[in-house]
Amino acid sequence: HASIHPCPVYLIGYASSDSSQPLTGDEMFQDVMSDYANRTVTIDPHPHVSGPHASIHPCQHGAVMKTIVRNLSKTAEGDEGKPPSVEMYLFIFLKFVSSI
């Protein structure tokens, strides 16, 4: 039985657009919605890049995406409709990430 494991998403913030000074973990959390802080998003070390990064947990974004896609796929009568195309799924995922 094969399974697919989504990879984590790591984000880092900088003090300003022209700065090379990364934000601290606490400063990055100021930009994270409180519903996601310390649950869906935590501050973790990146496996290949030094410094703190906001990490979106794969088990959480998978569950959130499943709910979003299920809700978007429902027809007006409440039946499950056609699943989104790969391109639309990617667009929905990027909108989800940008909302965090």
Image (cartoon, rainbow, N blue to C red):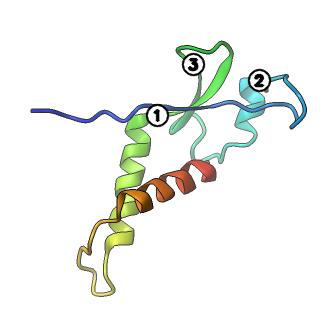
- Mark 2: amino acid: Thr
Q: Under tag 1, what secondary structure?
A: loop
Rounded to the nearest angstrom, the CA distance separating label 1 from label 2 is 19 Å
Residue visible at 37% across and 68% down in the picture = 71
Task: Give residue 20's position: percent from left, percent from top.
Answer: 84, 23
User: Crowdedness of circle 1 by 10 Å Cα count: few (<14), some, many (20+)?
Assistant: some
Q: Which residue is mark 1?
A: 57
Q: Which mark is residue 46?
A: 3
Rounded to the nearest angstrom, the CA distance separating label 1 from label 3 is 12 Å
**Whether residue 17 is situated above or below residue 19 in the rendered picture:** below
**Whether residue 65 is situated above or below residue 2 in the rendered picture:** below
> Where is residue 53, by image quadrant?
top right
Q: Pointer 2 and pointer 3: residues touching (CB < 8 Å)?
A: no
Q: Under tag 2, what secondary structure?
A: loop
User: Crowdedness of circle 2 by 10 Å Cα count: few (<14), some, many (20+)?
Assistant: some
Q: Which residue is mark 2?
A: 24
Q: Quadrant of the N terminus?
A: top left
